[in-house]
């Protein structure tokens, strides 16, 4: 009888263990550097599109090791394609890191992840007799493209 009770207790305890896809207990607020793996372009991206990034440094968070190269996933939070004088813009939201065992660690952006195409002014000389003047042609910018190697930082987000 005692053996059956002990066996039942072990089975109940084992079934209460967290699933392999659960988030590990790591402290919030730890900063980890990352870089883009995917390319996101304001001309073609849609809100809700996923992108991939990876960590660029090893991180030790409590008992959890996060090696450099750990991949993560994020989502395009907002996008606006260039049109006329409007510059293309992108806002990216990193969401989680994927550990080797498949578990996720939730993250948030630690550095700005909103981008806009740059405006450029191309100077040129204006020929006026006796005077040298410089004018310029303004290019209002086009679409913005964020590609592999673009760096940013994430922080471990509190679990909700």
Image (cartoon, rainbow, N blue to C red):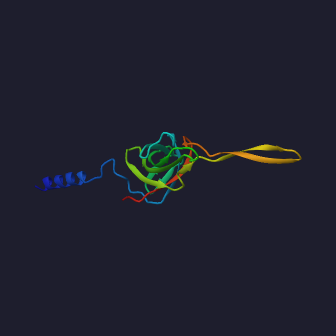
Q: Position of residue 7 (x, y in %)?
A: 17, 52
Residue at the outermost left position: 1
User: Which image quadrant for residue 156?
Assistant: bottom left
The reply, left or right, for residue 120 in relation to residue 98 is: right
Residue at 54% in and 40% down? 148
Q: Residue 44 versus residue 73: which sits nearer the camera?
A: 44
On screen, 106 above or below 42?
below
Image side of residue 125 versus residue 116, left or right? right
Identify the image quadrant of the C terminus: bottom left
Q: Is 118 on the left-hand or right-hand side of 4? A: right
Quarter of the figure that contains the N terminus: bottom left
* Front in this rendered view, residue 158 or 12: 158
Q: How many marks?
A: 0
Q: Position of residue 67 (x, y in %)?
A: 49, 46
The residue under the point 73% across, 46% down is 136
Camera-nearest residue between 17 and 51: 51
Would you identify the image quadrant in which residue 2 lies?
Answer: bottom left
Q: Position of residue 151 (x, y in %)?
A: 56, 47
């Amino acid at each position: 009888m005692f053996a059956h009770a002990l066996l039942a207790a072990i089975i109940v305890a084992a079934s209460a263990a967290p699933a392999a896809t659960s988030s590990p207990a790591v402290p919030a607020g730890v900063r980890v550097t990352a870089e883009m793996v995917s390319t996101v372009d304001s001309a073609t991206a849609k809100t809700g599109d996923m992108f991939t990034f990876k960590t660029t440094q090893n991180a030790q968070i409590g008992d959890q090791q996060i090696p450099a190269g750990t991949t993560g996933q994020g989502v395009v939070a907002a996008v606006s394609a260039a049109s006329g004088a409007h510059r293309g813009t992108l806002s990216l939201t990193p969401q989680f890191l994927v550990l080797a065992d498949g578990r996720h660690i939730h993250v948030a952006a630690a550095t700005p992840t909103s981008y806009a195409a740059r405006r450029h002014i191309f100077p040129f000389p204006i020929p006026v007799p006796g005077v040298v003047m410089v004018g310029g042609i303004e290019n209002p910018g086009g679409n913005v493209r964020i590609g592999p190697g673009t760096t940013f930082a994430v922080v471990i987000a509190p679990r909700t």
